[in-house]
Amino acid sequence: MQFTFRLEITELTWEDKAMIDDLMLRYCSARRFAFNRLLEGNTVNWTVHLLQDTTLSLNWRYFDHAAS
């Protein structure tokens, strides 16, 4: 089961903001890639496998959440 908490992060440095922006850019790219592969008829497991072969450098959990 996945839980989502909404919160506001205060007093971030520019470096922290850049790191979060980079992470979100790569995650959104993974979601877009997974969506297109699922539209092509691939299974979720195969899509996660394809995501792991990309250069997005994310944890497998990010890929699993992007594909499901």
Image (cartoon, helix red, strand yellow):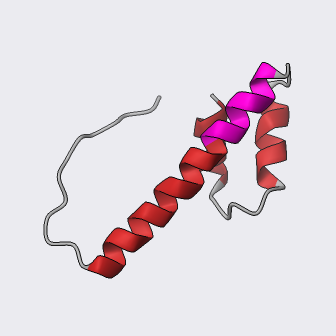
Q: Is residue 54 visible?
A: yes
Position of residue 7 measured from the top left corner of the image (x, y, whole percent): 19, 47
Side of 11 where 63 appears, left or right: right
Q: Is residue 56 magenta?
A: no
The residue at the point 84 percent across, 45 percent down is 50
Q: Quadrant of residue 53?
A: bottom right
The residue at the point 17 percent across, 52 percent down is 8
Q: Is residue 64 visible?
A: no
Q: Furthest residue to the left? A: 10
Q: Quadrant of residue 9?
A: bottom left
Q: Quadrant of residue 31?
A: top right
The residue at the point 42 percent across, 62 percent down is 21
Vertically, is 52 above or below 57? above
The residue at the point 23 percent across, 41 percent down is 6
Vertically, is 13 above or below 34? below
Q: Quadrant of the C terminus?
A: top right
Position of residue 57 measured from the top left corner of the image (x, y, whole percent): 67, 64
Vertically, is 57 above or below 53? below
Question: Looking at the magenta stretch, what is its main secondary structure?
Answer: helix
Side of 10 where 59 appears, left or right: right
Position of residue 60 measured from the top left corner of the image (x, y, whole percent): 67, 51
Q: Is residue 32 magenta?
A: yes
The residues colored magenta run: 31-39
